[in-house]
Amino acid sequence: MSAIDSVLKETRLFPPSDEFRTKANVSGMEGYNALCEKANNDYEGFWAELARELVTWKKPFTKTLNDSNAPAYKWFEDGELNVSYNCIDRHLEARGNKTAIIFEADDGSVTKVTYRELYERVCAFANGLKSLGVSKGDRVVIYMPHGIEAVVAMQASARIGAIHSVVFGGFSAGALRDRIADAQAKVVITANQSVRGGKAVPLKATTDEAVALGGCESVSKIVVYQRTDAAPEQWSDLNIWWHDLVAGQPADCEPEWVDAEHPLFILYTSGSTGKPKGIQHSTGGYLLGSQVTMQWVFDYKENDVFWCTADVGWITGHSYVAYGPLGIGATQIVFEGVPTFPDAGRFWQMIEKHKVTTFYTAPTAIRSLIKLGGDLPKQYDLSSLRVLGTVGEPINPEAWIWYHEVVGGGRCPIVDTWWQTETGANMIAPLPGAVATKPGSCTLPLPGIIVDIVDESGAPVEPGKGGFLVIKKPWPSMVRTIWNDPDRFKKTYFPEEYNSKLYLAGDSANRDENGYIWIMGRIDDVLNVSGHRLGTMEIESALVANPLVAEAAVVGKPHEIKGEAVVAFVVLKGERPEGEDAKKIAKELREWVAHEIGKIAQPDEIRFGDNLPKTRSGKIMRRLLRDIAKGQSITQDTSTLENPAILDQLAKSAI
Ligand code: WTA
């Protein structure tokens, strides 16, 4: 029985406790159904009401949805607002002295910032950016450690109407260069180093390397935050210290009021081709998505201590660190380090220390912490916890049950949240005081999110039959376009096969007889490794850029901790290496990929062959490679294969 079949047979049901349900923002299935019905009866009115309630507008909108140029949908288009005003200024009166961020550094030292202090820091930095000539619509690349300053940089960019593009600090110089060049960034904000798990990561040196690769001529300044004492190796007129930039800047900065559709940020994510896509998000709709899900999914309460462990380099760190919690006026934890340093009890120790109520992390982290110290949570007082969340990949029922019992004490609802960089906010997830959870299922769509599972023709499939996950109506926080590539946006997400009307998520899914949704995996050439999206083509292009490599094909295989592991089949220009030679070259190629893209994309396994399995027309048959990677014998049809003998060689190619 495959893992998918086994989760579909999962029948355990965990309804919210009476106590939780009674106090919840959305209480019971009556509450959930009432919202869904409201959305069904008047879709635009439903969203408009929420947008008026949860977002503060400088100029109120009068139009809700404009679909005249679909699929380039517009929401609240004649409204004006500023995201930074919504995240900071509007809280100053009632919550000026409330802690906005509790920052815990890698070494355990803690810095707290109130909303008032955050306001001052953001305004000073926003003024600093202005002094560098950054203005509305300019792009700012942020390549920083996960910390207060990264959030300040994002908020400051939003404050002056600039468009940020955060690049995860684990990406290499090449990946950073590509993103700077595609966005034509005016300013790059980085740090001399970041610190993770006791080790320093040279962000400034990597930024210098990225710029030296060429194509970054748009960059007129690189702002460097001094995170450690290490002096940067290079320093030029292009560089300015963060502390010098903000010195003497006024601690007030009038927000730039922008249209609801003004781009707030671009975030690059992997797709089916070798080139990452710049996902462009809006201001008004995006902010609404983050706010409403804080209310519904995380059941936000004024005294909560919210902790989302994602780095700001990913969408989860955008919506549930930089914007969602601040927009709603929460106190949140921002943690610089890694879950296993100094030991695998770090998360639990921090939950105890900071009395965390809402904890949101990835299944891969849960699985690795079970493995490294499944009993460790018991050593800590985790009684402050109220809601637990997961994101990024399907969670296996065993890990779910452990999270529920050992971390949540059997008391806390688990919100398994399905969403994507493109959706901007949670889409399918249980409302914790309403929807009974099932281990491994992200349960039901949020009110106002109209989801279906369809076949190739776009017709809905029966329960129990897998199909493609689609979203049938536009929603406020949806991707607006792909930066520089509107055609790719239409083709990828609103394919003509579905009359350009359905949003194709790129995931396959199943619905059980209760209408619960089970995500099965990607339908495109995207891998999900430790909750990170990686394009197989991206890794293949990196491999073939190595002078030794003639051809490469990358596939995923199931992995106990990471969910999926990367397996690369490689044909060298010279002889097929064996024994020690093969090991040496494999190591070299892994380092090469780390250098080209980043460590997260390194193949777990490299196998060498004289060739790859191809059809007569020269197409690589990846499904056969997937079987070989899993160590399975091939039972599929191989009659279209040009070179069947290669399968045997590849099957024995593990090194
Ligand atoms: C997968 C992360 C199962 C899915 C927010 C999706 C999930 C991709 C879940 C998006 C979940 C995300 N259960 N699979 N709860 N959440 N995924 O853009 O394949 O980094 O398409 O956004 O992650 O990844 P992305």
Image (cartoon, helix red, strand yellow):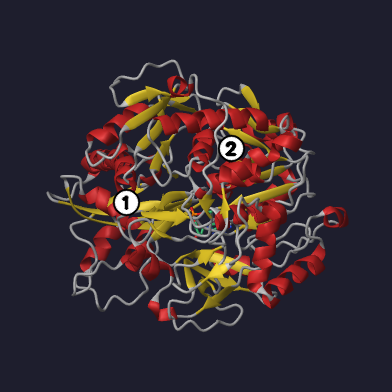
Q: Which quarter shows the N terminus? A: bottom right
The label number, if any, that marks residue 308 in the structure image: none
For the residues carrying marks 1 and 2, which lies nearer the camera in this image? Answer: 2
The image quarter in which residue 105 lies: top right
| Residue type, label 2 | Leu
Cα gap from disc 1 to disc 2, whole angstroms: 27 Å
Percent x, y for residue 349?
Answer: 68, 31
Ranked by sequence position, the earlier of labels 1 and 2 is 2
Please give the name of the residue rendered at 75% of the width and 34% of the height, measured from the top-left corner: 355
Residues at discs 1 and 2 in contact (Cβ within 8 Å): no
Q: In this rendering, would 307 be left or right of 162?
A: right
Some atom of ligand 1 lies within 8 Å of the CB belonging to the residue at label 2: no
Relative to 172, does residue 467 appear above or below in the rendering? below
Asked if residue 268 can be seen in this view, the reply is yes
The secondary element bearing badge 2 is classed as helix
Q: In this rendering, would 624 be left or right of 388?
A: left
| Residue type, label 1 | Ala
Query: Mark 1, residues whose alpha carbon is within 10 Å: few (<14), some, or many (≥20)?
Result: some
Please give the name of the residue rendered at 56% of the width and 78% of the height, measured from the top-left corner: 465
Percent x, y for residue 98?
Answer: 73, 32
The image quarter in which residue 53 lies: bottom right
The label number, if any, that marks residue 654 in the structure image: 1
Residue lying farthest to the front in this orientation: 59
Asked if residue 370 can be seen in this view, the reply is no
Relative to 401, does residue 186 appear above or below in the rendering? above
Task: Identify residue for label 2.
Answer: 372
Percent x, y for residue 301?
Answer: 77, 46
The secondary element bearing badge 1 is classed as loop
Percent x, y for residue 610?
Answer: 18, 57
